Amino acid sequence: MEPLLLLLGLAFAANKVVSVVKSLTSGDFNTPVTQLLVWAAAIGGLFLAANADVTEHLIVPGVSDQTLGTLGGASLVLLGLIAGSTGSVVYDFKKAIDGSDSAAEPRLLDAHNTP
């Protein structure tokens, strides 16, 4: 990846790891479970894409000429953590600027309460 984008993605991942730890220590299990689900979905999606005929030859932007199918497991996990964390940071930003909370969603572990 481009060095700046890679560092930014790693910073987002670190931020989300800290957020998960802070939530766990405060007794909030919704945030960690939700974030773990996001990471699992991103990592699983990348492993699937790396092994699917239709996307295995997709060139990963910023990773020179490497295709998704040629990346090793550690690279796919790292890209999944970065992608999932970046998505979460973008979602958090959108939620922060949406004063009306018009894009509210129910909590993952508290489905009976509305947002």
Image (cartoon, grey):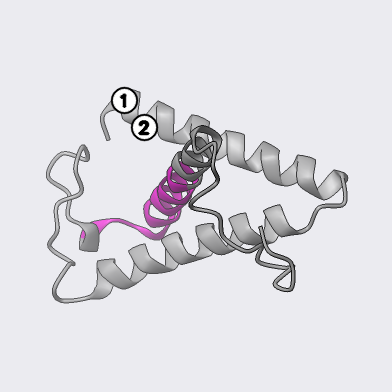
> Is 59 situated left or right of 3 in this image?
left
First to last magenta residue range? 70-87
Measuring from the top left, give residue 110's x and y in whole percent. Answer: 74, 68
Displayed quadrant of residue 80: bottom left
Q: Residue furthest front?
A: 100
When the figure is inspected, residue 98 is found, relative to residue 115, above or below; the finding is above
At a point 34% along the width and 63% down the height, the residue shown is: 46
> Is 1 situated left or right of 23 in this image?
left
User: Which of the pair 74/58 is nearer the observer?
Assistant: 58
When the figure is inspected, residue 93 is found, relative to residue 4, above or below; the finding is below
Measuring from the top left, give residue 100's x and y in whole percent. Answer: 54, 42
The amino acid type, in three-letter code, at marker 2 is Leu
Please rate how many residues cluster around mark 2, counting C-alpha atoms within 10 Å: few if below 14, some from 14 to 19, many from 20. Answer: some
At a point 33% along the width and 29% down the height, the residue shown is: 5
Please rate how many residues cluster around mark 1, counting C-alpha atoms within 10 Å: few if below 14, some from 14 to 19, many from 20. Answer: few
Q: Are marks 1 and 2 in contact (CB under 8 Å)?
A: yes
Q: Quadrant of the C terminus?
A: bottom right
Q: Which residue is mark 2?
A: 6
Measuring from the top left, give residue 90's x and y in whole percent. Answer: 44, 40
Q: Is residue 72 magenta?
A: yes
When the figure is inspected, residue 108 is found, relative to residue 32, above or below; the finding is below
Displayed quadrant of residue 67: bottom left
The amino acid type, in three-letter code, at marker 1 is Pro
Measuring from the top left, give residue 13's x and y in whole percent. Answer: 53, 39
